[in-house]
Image (cartoon, grey):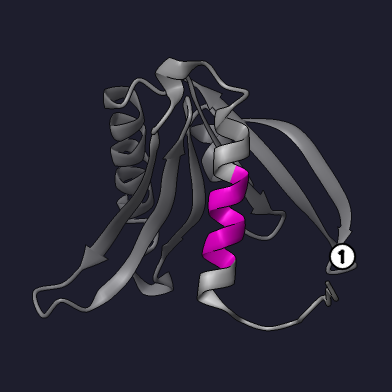
């Protein structure tokens, strides 16, 4: 059998890799944490349905992981970021998650997350040559 490494965007192949890793991991977690995967999308929309920001996350095993949180620049400092974050935290608590994890860059929202009780557990220097990448966690 000849095998090759292919560089391509293949949704079915991606799903295979995702499913394979999930099923492998499932063997190593307690049974009561099985089947605990759920994508979360929270969006700020106006009356016309136009998106002005949002939060993308997922629940996996016993945590909620926030992948993206953005609020349009012209509506920042009006509390929408806090509302998104608090809604995600409420969902995590309802789903009996033990913690939330996320990451941010030094020019993004480190202070915002720290103000909301998140603590840095790791960093990477030299990101984009001039920045840091921060990894944060909040126990629930």
Q: Nearer the viewer, residue 94 or 87?
A: 94
Q: Quadrant of the C terminus?
A: top left
Extent of the magenta region: 14-21
Secondary structure found at label 1: loop
- Compared across the picture, whether 76 is left or right of 22 comes to left
Q: Quadrant of the N terminus?
A: bottom right
- Compared across the picture, whether 7 is left or right of 92 comes to right
Q: Nearer the viewer, residue 28 or 91?
A: 28
Kindly identify the residue that appears in the image at 84 percent across and 48 percent down.
124
Q: Nearer the viewer, residue 41 or 105?
A: 41
Q: Which residue is mark 1?
A: 130
On the image, the x and y values in percent for residue 87 come to 28, 39
Kindly identify the residue that appears in the image at 29 percent across and 34 percent down.
91
Kindly identify the residue that appears in the image at 41 percent across and 23 percent down.
97
Dominant secondary structure of the residues highlighted in magenta in the image: helix
On the image, the x and y values in percent for residue 122 come to 78, 36
On the image, the x and y values in percent for residue 28 come to 62, 23
Magenta span contains residue 97? no
Q: Please determine whether, in this image, residue 130 is positioned above or below residue 42.
A: below
Toward which corner of the image does residue 5 lie, by quadrant? Answer: bottom right
């Amino acid at each position: 059998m000849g095998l090759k490494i292919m560089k391509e965007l293949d949704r079915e192949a991606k799903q295979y890799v995702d499913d394979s890793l999930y099923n492998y991991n499932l063997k190593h977690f307690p049974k009561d944490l099985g089947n605990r995967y759920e994508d979360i999308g929270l969006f700020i929309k106006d009356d016309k349905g136009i998106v002005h920001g949002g939060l993308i996350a997922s629940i996996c095993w016993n945590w909620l992981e926030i992948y993206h949180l953005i609020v349009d620049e012209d509506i920042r400092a009006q509390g929408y970021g806090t509302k998104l974050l608090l809604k995600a935290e409420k969902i995590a608590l309802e789903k009996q998650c033990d913690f939330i994890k996320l990451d941010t860059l030094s020019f993004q929202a480190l202070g915002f997350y720290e103000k909301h009780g998140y603590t840095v557990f790791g960093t990477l220097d030299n990101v984009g040559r001039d920045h840091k990448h921060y990894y944060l966690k909040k126990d629930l």
